[in-house]
Image (tube, rainbow, N blue to C red):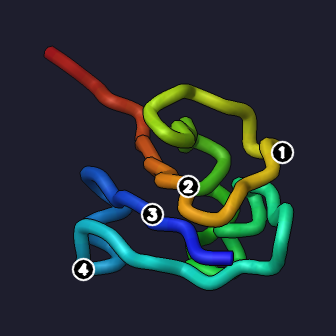
Amino acid sequence: MRVRVLFFAVIREKLGKNEAVIELPPSCPVSGLQEHLGIEKSLWSSLAFAVNQTYVPGGTPLKDGDEVALIPPVAGG
């Protein structure tokens, strides 16, 4: 299946792109993207996830055509 992954802030800077289309096995959970994208565990554990513009836990299974946003914590001041 194919999913579109959107990158923001530190993730976008680390990967050097705004988005990617990723091939994954059927019913792969959001957490399966970590290994595929090569994001270290310490950074991954601080992310929030949204699938099709709805916040979800990392164990949520993905479907073909889903849009996944990886959202790092935001600090203000």
Q: Marks 4 and 1: which is nearer the front?
A: 1
Name the residue at 66% across, 68% down: 33
Whole-percent x and y of residue 1? 69, 76
In this view, the residue farthest toward the front is 65
Q: CA distance from mark 3 to mark 2?
A: 8 Å
Name the residue at 28% across, 65% down: 12
Element at badge 3?
Answer: strand
The residue indicated by pointer 4 is 16
Whole-percent x and y of residue 16? 24, 80
The residue indicated by pointer 1 is 59
Circles 4 and 1 in contact, beta carbons < 8 Å: no
Mark positioned earlier in the residue sequence (2 or 1): 1
Q: Amino acid at mark 4?
A: Gly
Nearest the viewer among 42 and 16 is: 16
Name the residue at 55% across, 67% down: 3
Circles 4 and 3 in contact, beta carbons < 8 Å: no
Mark positioned earlier in the residue sequence (2 or 4): 4
Q: CA distance from mark 1 to mark 3?
A: 16 Å
Q: Marks 2 and 1: which is nearer the front?
A: 2
Circles 1 and 3 in contact, beta carbons < 8 Å: no
Q: Amino acid at mark 1?
A: Gly
Mark positioned earlier in the residue sequence (3 or 2): 3
Q: CA distance from mark 4 to mark 3?
A: 13 Å
Q: Amino acid at mark 3?
A: Val
The residue indicated by pointer 3 is 5
Whether residue 38 appears in this view of the structure is no
Mark positioned earlier in the residue sequence (4 or 3): 3
Q: CA distance from mark 2 to mark 4?
A: 22 Å
The residue indicated by pointer 2 is 66
Q: Is residue 68 above or below residue 48?
A: below
Q: Marks 4 and 3: which is nearer the front?
A: 3
